[in-house]
């Protein structure tokens, strides 16, 4: 039986960081995440909606897929703040459930099969009870996230990283084989920075500079105090110093760009350490979930816009990053590499622009970078920001260096509103598909790949409509399959090169006369008139369609 409703002060925003992850997915939040959450109740399949379901998270057990539609609508109409339903991979009813939740104004959570209902209920009730009984605990940050952030920053800078809170207490640090100085050793062992070094920092005005904004402070070495050179950045929010991040130099100088990486790490650390007004928990994971939801077209832009502090009508650019795995291991090691890559991308995104946010989705990494300037006239052509393209190139170079594996990125054309982000993501995916055949190419923009992207779309439409084809070219396909020849490739190369026999022959590593013979033979087999521009165009499209079909 459900417990009685109570005014706990909790909201869906409190709940999201604790629940949302690999096993629970936020599918819809039509009224945002600031809706009050009174309690958590379990609803049996045949149970009628109750008055005390109002404002609750209702767990619909015993139903899934299309079977959850009726109780979902009933719970929404009874005033439920959110409904959780069991979902599975490829669930065809998912979009229907999401639309129903939006119409009811009810948030919708999808619970994977691997998650047990009792676990979900226990965790949700813990969050609600914590906010109700001890609001000050609701804003606790996750040390695990800070340790991971410190390790990523250490890898990017080549230094030794420590994170301290506002009382100079060490709360997270990186593992390192680099020699640490006496200050670092004592800070970790004693959980606080030695007083003599603190006094020296205060005398030098370091803390005053750290409170003043986002400056990265270069702190000179103090051999007399056992301290090597450091870079420091304040973790600030609303003019308040929440803590500091320190990067100690080891036996070798810090890497180029360490200051920029440190600035991004400080911004991410602030998201981990602060609570949303009202005492919400860690924001960084929630931002990523909201970003993934927007990219996938599951969530309205208002939720993410509120988190980023921008208007929903703000324009944005989407960047897609592809990590081409060279390792066959698909286990924990591969997942760890992907997680580390995601952290690096998030750190660099935060360093580039405070409102930029990264998310993992369907095996790729994406960055959504809202416009830094006010929204422009949506009717005017929008082109990629050279600064953002340059930043993307730097990101790819960094990832390739640290991950030791090919990385490619695509910069979609800017879109005028956050609501258009899903279309921008699709465009970025198409650009990645275009450059995937050229591993040496690190970054491409829509302007770079516009013709190839449009052509790819046309070929995709032809593949979806197999009845639209030129049967004459089927003879070439049969000939290649029977004799192991390269008639299709030779003809396509010839058409692409405007009949430049020598260039195509060199590329195919054959004699020009061999290519001439193949072209004559192709004309005989198909009856194509190569002097007819329309027949040439159809042949080029058909041969591309056939090639893509063979490759897939």
Image: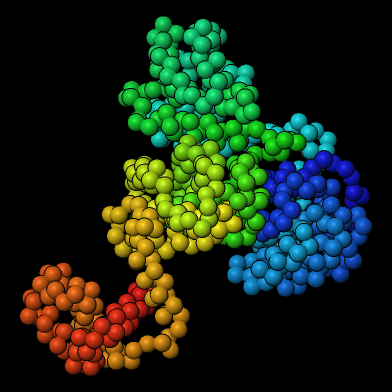
Q: Is residue 447 visible?
A: yes
Q: Is residue 188 left or right of residue 514?
A: right
Q: Position of residue 20 (x, y in %)?
A: 66, 51
User: Which residue is at a point 42% across and 53% down the rendered structure image?
Assistant: 383
Q: Position of residue 178 (x, y in %)?
A: 38, 26
User: Which residue is at a point 68% across and 35% down the rendered structure image?
Assistant: 275
Q: Position of residue 261 (x, y in %)?
A: 44, 33
Q: Is residue 41 left or right of residue 357?
A: right
User: Which residue is at a point 41% across and 47% down the rendered structure image?
Assistant: 385
User: Which residue is at a point 39% across and 58% down the rendered structure image?
Assistant: 446
Please determine whether, in this image, residue 483 is positioned above or below residue 56.
below
Residue 283 location, quadrant: top right
Please determine whether, in this image, residue 216 is positioned above or below residue 98.
above
From the image, which quarter does the N terminus lie in? bottom right
Please determine whether, in this image, residue 379 is positioned above or below residue 535.
above
Q: Is residue 290 visible?
A: no
Residue 412 location, quadrant: bottom left
């Amino acid at each position: 039986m459900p417990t009685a409703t109570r005014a706990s002060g909790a909201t869906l925003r409190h709940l999201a960081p604790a629940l949302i992850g690999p096993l629970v997915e936020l599918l819809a939040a039509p009224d945002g995440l600031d809706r009050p959450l009174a309690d958590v109740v379990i609803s049996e399949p045949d149970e009628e909606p109750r008055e005390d379901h109002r404002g609750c998270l209702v767990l619909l057990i015993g139903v899934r897929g299309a079977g959850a539609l009726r109780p979902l609508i009933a719970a929404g109409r009874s005033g439920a703040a959110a409904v959780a339903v069991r979902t599975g991979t490829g669930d065809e009813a998912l979009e229907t459930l999401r639309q129903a939740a939006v119409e009811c104004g009810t948030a919708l959570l999808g619970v994977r099969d691997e998650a047990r209902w009792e676990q979900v209920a226990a965790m949700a009730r813990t969050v609600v009870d914590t906010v109700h009984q001890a609001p000050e605990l609701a804003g606790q940050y996750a040390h695990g996230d800070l340790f991971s952030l410190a390790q990523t920053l250490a890898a990017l800078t080549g230094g030794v990283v420590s994170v301290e809170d506002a009382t100079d207490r060490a709360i997270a640090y990186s593992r390192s084989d680099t020699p640490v100085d006496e200050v670092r050793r004592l800070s970790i062992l004693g959980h606080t920075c030695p007083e003599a070094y603190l006094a020296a920092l205060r005398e030098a005005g370091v803390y005053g500079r750290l409170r003043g904004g986002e400056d990265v402070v270069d702190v000179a070495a103090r051999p007399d105090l056992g301290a090597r050179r450091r870079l420091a950045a304040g973790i600030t929010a609303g003019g308040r110093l929440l803590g500091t991040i320190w990067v100690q130099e080891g036996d070798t100088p810090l890497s180029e760009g360490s200051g920029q990486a440190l600035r991004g790490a400080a911004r991410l650390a602030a998201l981990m350490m602060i609570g949303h007004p009202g005492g919400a928990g860690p924001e960084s994971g929630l931002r990523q979930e909201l970003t993934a939801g927007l990219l996938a077209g599951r969530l309205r832009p208002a939720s993410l816009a509120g988190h980023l502090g921008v208007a929903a009508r703000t324009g944005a650019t989407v960047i897609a990053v592809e990590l081409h795995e060279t390792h066959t291991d698909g286990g924990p090691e591969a997942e760890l590499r992907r997680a580390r890559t995601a952290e690096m991308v998030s750190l660099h995104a935060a360093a580039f622009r405070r409102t930029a946010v990264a998310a993992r989705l369907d095996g790729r990494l994406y960055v959504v970078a809202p416009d830094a300037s006010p929204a422009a006239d949506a009717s005017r052509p929008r082109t990629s920001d050279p600064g953002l393209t340059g930043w993307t190139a730097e990101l790819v170079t960094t990832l390739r260096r640290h991950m030791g594996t090919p990385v490619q990125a695509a910069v979609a054309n800017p879109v005028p509103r956050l609501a258009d982000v899903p279309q921008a993501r699709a465009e970025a995916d198409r650009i990645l598909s275009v450059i995937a055949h050229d591993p040496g190419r690190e970054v491409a923009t829509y302007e770079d790949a516009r013709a190839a992207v449009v052509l790819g779309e046309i070929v995709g439409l032809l593949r979806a409509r197999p009845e639209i084809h030129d049967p004459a070219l089927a003879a070439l396909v049969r000939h290649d399959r029977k004799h192991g020849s390269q008639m299709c490739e030779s003809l396509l190369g010839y058409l692409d090169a405007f009949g430049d026999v020598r260039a195509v022959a060199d590329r195919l590593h054959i004699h020009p006369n061999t290519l001439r013979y193949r072209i004559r033979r192709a004309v005989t087999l198909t009856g194509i008139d190569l002097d007819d521009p329309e027949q040439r165009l159809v042949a080029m499209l058909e041969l591309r369609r056939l090639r893509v079909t063979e490759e897939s």
